[in-house]
Structures are given as C-alpha cells and as structure tokens.
Amino acid sequence: MRSSRGEDIMPREFSERRRRRRREHMATARDDCGASLPYEMIIEVMQWLPVKSVFRFKAVCRSWAALLSSDEFRRLHMAAAKAAKRRAPPAKLLYISPTTTFDSTAVYSCSFSRSSSSDRPRDRGDLLFTIDGARGNYMEVVTPAPCHGLTLLYDALDTAYYICNAATRAATRLPPSADEASSSAAGLGFDARTNEHKVVRLINGMLNQKNLDPVRCEVYTPRGPYVDCCWRPATRGVPSSLHKFVHAAVINASCNKLSPVFANGCLHWLMTPASFITTPSVAIVSFSVAEETFTCIRSPPFWVPGAPPTSRNWSSGEQLLEMDDQLCLVRNRMPHGSNTLEIWKLLDYSSGDWLLNHRINLSGHLARDLRQSQILRVIGSFGSYRPPRKKIIIATSMHKISNKYQKMVHTYDTRSEALETILSITETHSTPQYGCPSSRFSFIQETLAPVHTTDEEMALSSDLAKATREILLRLPAKSAILSKLVCKQWFRLIESKNFIQSYFQHKNIDKRPKVMLVLKRTGQLGFSFAPLSRCLKEAPSHSTLLDTKVVCSKPCHGLNLLSTETKDYLCNPCTGFHRGYSNLGPNLHLRPRMPKTEEHAFTVGNKNVGLSFNPLTREHVIVEIFYNQKDFESRQYDMSCALHWCNTPYAAQQHSIPPLPVNDMPPAYVKGMLYWMNEPRLGQSCEWAIVSFNLATGAFDVVPCPLWFARWRSRNRCRAFVVELEGVLCAVLADPVADKLDVWKLELDQWGRAYTIHLEACPGYSLKTSVVVPLAVDPDHGRILLNTGRKIGLYDPVEQTIENLYSLDQVPVASSAHLKFLDMPSTSSGDSLMCSKEESVVETNKIDSKLIRSVPMLYEESLACYSFVRKANCLW
C-alpha cells in the first residue's frame, strides 16, 4: 500500500540489484521480527518520521537497524522531508559556543520563538553535543544553511574543518590539507549525480611557491572513491582567465569572513569592487560541484561596470544568501546612510538578471541593535503555515566590554514588517587577537545524512589499534618516536594530537619530578641529557662536561628551555627534539655589564628568559626581557621585551616592557601566566612586587607580595623570587642571616605561608654562599627538592635535614632510598650519556669551582615537538 504523496518521492525505476536488496530486507524483517511487514510499508511509514523517532526504531531489531541505516532509506527520508517542508513546523536554529575551558565547542539548538515564560529573547538553547578538541573561541559556521543536512565548521586557529549533522548529533574532523595558502575560502556542496557531499577549497598560494599555480582549487569527498579520502585537485582546475576573479573572491571571503553559498548545484563566492581598479562586469565566481568547472555571474544592477569603485573599503556590506532554493545577494545600505537591507534574487544564470525581492527597513526603535552591530548577516528564512507567512533570519554580533561579545538572532516578518529578537547570548572570548567570529548560527535540517568517519578515525577505532595504543603509551618516549617508522597506521596514531596528550597524561599521572643532567655534546644542539640514576653510578667524562654557562627552565607542557648568554634552545630531552632561537636584544653585541656580586647559578648574561604556554592556542612562547642598563646607585635602568612564538619560523617580535623592573631570578609559569619578582633596587618603588604576564591577552600586570616582606630596605640582605610548586604560584624570601627560606603560596587570591626551610645545619646549602631554589614537592611525603646549581637534595621539613642527591664538588654518592622520591627514567627515555668508568675520583674533584659543568633539570616525559612547516591561521 502506497499513498499518492509517497509515489512522488519513491523512485520510478529500480535496478535489479535494488529489488534484490528489498527482498532480502523484507525476508530478514520477517525472520527477525516475527511479523510479515512488507518492505514498502515499513519504508512508507518510516520515511515521514522525525530523525529522533527513526533512531528509536533502529533498536527494534537488527534488520530494522540495517534497513533504516541504508543509503536508500536516507535518500527517501530526505525527499520526504523536502516534500513536507511547507507543511512542517518551523525548523530549529543551531548555534555553537565555546565551553568554559575554551578547548571544546558546544552545539546548541533553539526554537524560532521567544521564551514562553517571560516573553523575552532566549538567553540559551538546548545542548545537543560537544565537539572535543575544537577550540570554540575560534570556531566558525561556514554554512549558515545546511547542505543536504550537513553543516561545515571551521577552526581558524588549527586550520581544521569539521562536518556535523545536528539532527543525528554526529561530527567528524576532516584530514588536514598539505597545500599551504596565504588565504583560502572553503564551502560545502552536494553532487546530485553521485549523492555525495564535497568540500571545495579555493587557495591563494604563497609567493615562494614558484612551481604551483597562484590560484588553486582542491576538493575533499568524504568516503569517496579516491585513495585514502584525501584532498585532491579539482578535476579541471581554475582557468587562467579567471585567476584574478578567483583571487579577489578568496580575498573578500577571508578578509570579511564571508562563506560561499551553495545553491542550484553550485558554490558561489562573492567579489568586491575594491579589489579592482574599475568595477568588473561580473560579481560572483561559481563552481559546479558535479562538473567541477568554474564560471562567473554578472554583477547586480547597482554595480556600474567600468566605473571606479565607489569605495576602497574592503567591507562592502554585501553577502550572498540561499533563500527559497535560489541564490540571493544581501546589500547592507547602512554604511551609505540608509537604514535599509536589500535582498536581490538572481532570476537567470545565463542572462544574469537580478530582481529586488525584499527591502527591510531598520529605522525603527526595535532595529537599534541591528544598526549598532559590528557584524550583520542574513542567514536564511523559514515559513510558517498557520497563517502562511515568511520570516527572514538576521544574526548580529557586537562587542560590549572587555572580552564580552553579544550575539543576537532576529526575525523579520515580510508581511507585517515586524522585527523580533528571539535569541540574545553573551560570550566571553579568551583573547581578542583573532577578533570576534562572524557567524556562529545555522539551521537544523531533519535528515539522516551520514557523517562519514575518515580513514584515520576508522583505523584508530579498531580493536588492534586500541591494543597497539595501550602498548605504545607504556613505551619510553624515544622508543615511541622510533615506532612511527613501523607502518603508516602507527605513524598516524603516534602523530595524532589525542595520542600525544594521552601519552603526556599517562607518563606524568603521579606528578613525581623527573631529573636529568644537562651536559655537553658535539653536534647541532651542543647538549646531551643524562638520567640522574646513571650519573649517580658512573662519573661523567671530562669531554662531556659543559664549558659554557647554561640555565634550565622547569618543564612547561613537555618542553624545557635551555638558555645561554646569546641563544635559547627549546628542547624535549626525552625525544631529542630541539630548536634554537637567537636573542633579539638591541645591544646583544655588548658584553653584559652585570656586577660580579650579582652572578649566581641562575643568571645568564643581561637577560631574563621564561618559557610560557598558551592553553588556548596550544603553543609555547618564549618571553625575553633584556637589560641594556642597570645602575643600582642611581636606580636607573633600561630594558626591552620580546616574544618568540615557537610554532612559527619568524623572528622574535618586540613587545611592551613590564611596568616594573624584574630581578635576575628566572620566572615561574602557572596556568598560562608568567611571573617575575621585581627588582626593588631599580626604579621608583622600593617594595617587592610580582610582575605577571598574561600570554592570552599580551598584557603585563602587578601582583602584590605578602605583606610580611613587601618592603625592601637597603641594609636588608634578603633575596626574593617566585617559583611554582604543586601548580601554585609561590613567593620565596631567602634570609641569609637566619639561613632560612620562607615560602608563601597564592591560592584564591590570598597569600598563605606554605613552608619554612631551615638551612643553618646544611653547610652545602647555606644562603650565605649560594642561591637555593625549591624545585618540587614530594607528593607522598612532603619533602622538598632543593637546587643550588651545584647540588640537588631532598629537604625534610620535619627533621629539618637534607639528603644530598648529587653534587659537583665530590664524587656523587646516593643510596637507593634517596631516589624513591624521584621518578627515574629508563636509559632509553633520553639521550643517554656515555659515562666512562676509567675516570677517577681525583679527576672528578678537579672540576672548576666557578663553572657549573653539569646542570640538573626537571623534565616531563612527553612527545611534544614543533614541525618546521608553516601553519597559516587564515579564516576559511
């Protein structure tokens, strides 16, 4: 039995293969469900159900699950949804928003009506699902109108695309493209001949790519017939005669965050007259998704071909739109003094005739939010059937205060010309450096369109891959890196960000400090890393001892910074990764004019360098502060500051200087912030204070010290500095007279005393002759690891004694009980030091007392590294 409306949707001709599949489904349904339900009857009923109900019916039996998951049923369900579109209630709105930690994206749905309880705009929607790893602060909705049920999202920071189906709550991340671009613009289309979605990306190439076309096009077909489902060049490429138009369209899309629009089987990119000397006769670049060919569409009547552009402003206030299955162009007249929006409809592709379809008046009081908005986008329309009328959806974005942005959605009734705000949300942006995203809104289309998993996701989800993953997580870092050479699947697994993060968490879950010694090695890096356990058993040879001063940072998300007087090295001692950075000081050719009394184990020339990590961009940044002048008698100083982003090949960039001079002790990194203790002997202030640097905002600030030692006096010999202990910022006051360290910790914006370390009974750690720095705290027994640069030892706060672990002044001797606190690595986890048993105790004792020949360094086992490939953070 089949109704008349079903006959319009069911295909008229079926191949023999499809008929055979029907009979198999019907036979299976009878066997499994025990009911003689004809195949046609099941299809006829199920195709009209909403997606949520279809998913419930999949749980009836296996045959129904297979039937309702088939491509044939998906196509029929899509056709039924289109036929019932005019009779169905309004669709729901989709919007994305960053989670509270900014490391994921939450996807919400919202009704096209005000809140029934307060008759006010809604301030939130219903959470559908969350896309882990997609930085919500930089996520954009590329397709405001779903393309046959799917929506394309883009992470502008990670240059990653996501395809999702909000109705089925499924999402997948597309594999990265290997083609570098100075700017690009991508869109999602549908090939009706093959029933496949295609992601099409237009590329403006880099200037140094001499062997490649300056303008290129690549296509990704999810689960298509191409090998490995990777990005491929378009079948016919970009014609040379259209290069200038495609280039202008990409520039307009990337600068104004205008996504291409899919309509009538083609993707369309809009150009702007400001890209040309004279206004061209064409305005739109069109790409046929099925044929993979390019054409251009005539400009609308308000463009005057051949005349100079009316404005050289790149933001023309025009955008493309798909409305009622036709291509439209929105013209924002507000920048030109008229409070109106015009919507022009393309009547014919061949003739290029345009018709003014709607004119929206925004001069009323209710349209104030639209007039004041910084970004205005018309994202589509919907029609209600009781009574029949059409409403146009307008989304706006406006910067409020600081890092707050207000996102609103409005509906405009074309019959009554009434404007209504249905959604108003306020978002917090973690950093303003990328500006506010253009659009986070789209529609939800009730379809079963599949979100195909990529080859990488399928390979990593198999039982064998899961078992392999568990084994690799337990290998030393160097062995895990070598395992990438086994096969392509292992390479993808180990290179994936999820595995790198899991490896770091697995290896450092107990938070036990791990110690290596930094020594000399011939080669590009010039350093080697030896496990402390090996050096405690065998004395190092003279050929491996350092001949230059080195200061090491604490580990920062798996990497360490090694600093010399003229250069800094970012290293992973577990894998051998390293990268050198030259200093960017204005007077680097001068020798540092540091008083001899100021030199100690933790100073390096006339600079103070810290390693930071931006948790939002997941990138390490080196912060360098240089002193060009330092005079304690006149309290005069001159310093500069530079930042070096470790994931870019560019040189360091000058930055604004801190509000207070910093002392010579290394900074402390805590949760995306760097902290220095100021130098009270310089400048106008005679009080100790802490200088903070927020990497996300790029701003310096001042944090008050504990009141107990905030005031500095010239006769006071105490030294103050900051450290990180147990993930908390601590301020340390070293009193050489009392020979003790007072450690204060900052929790909940309140200072409290954490530890008092008495060193009067420990001659090798006396504050009268050494600078002693607390490195870490034993998570089990509360013992504190102390470092003087020449010695490291464990301080027991109860017994007030130190167990020496390593000393440069004598043959290293330590019992195995001393090492239980430290998580000693295996020899394969780092660059092992070749220790010689022939070196005698006498030779070891001849080490220069002034030069530190091996430096202890805390580290974390990780696979962190940076590639040398430039990553373009361009939108689309």
Image (tube, rainbow, N blue to C red):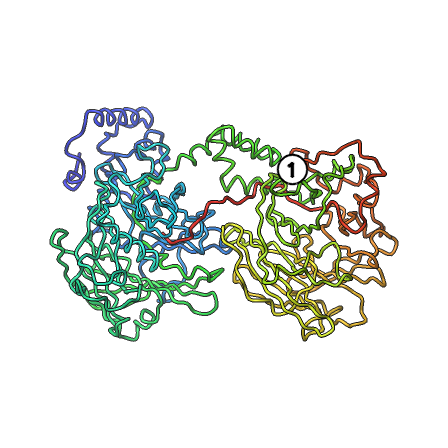
Residue 380 in which image quadrant: bottom left
- Residue placed farthest to the right in the image? 761
Q: Amino acid at mark 1?
A: Gly
Q: Which residue is more in the foreground, 339 or 576?
A: 576
Q: Which residue is more in the foreground, 649 or 50?
A: 649
Q: Which residue is more in the foreground, 638 or 755?
A: 638
**SS for callout 1:** loop
Residue 728 in which image quadrant: bottom right
Q: Residue at x 61, y 33 (%)?
A: 475
Residue 515 makes an appearance in the image = no
Q: Which residue is more in the foreground, 585 or 298?
A: 585
Decide: few, some or many residues near mark 1? Use Cα within 10 Å; few <14, some 14-19, many ≥20: many
x and y percentages locating residue 841 in the rendered image: 84, 37
Relative placement, left or right, of 279 versus 461 is: left
Residue 225 in which image quadrant: top left
Q: Identify residue for label 1.
A: 830
Residue 132 vertical placement versus 387 (above, below): above
- Residue placed farthest to the left in the image? 351
Quadrant where the N terminus is found in the figure: top left
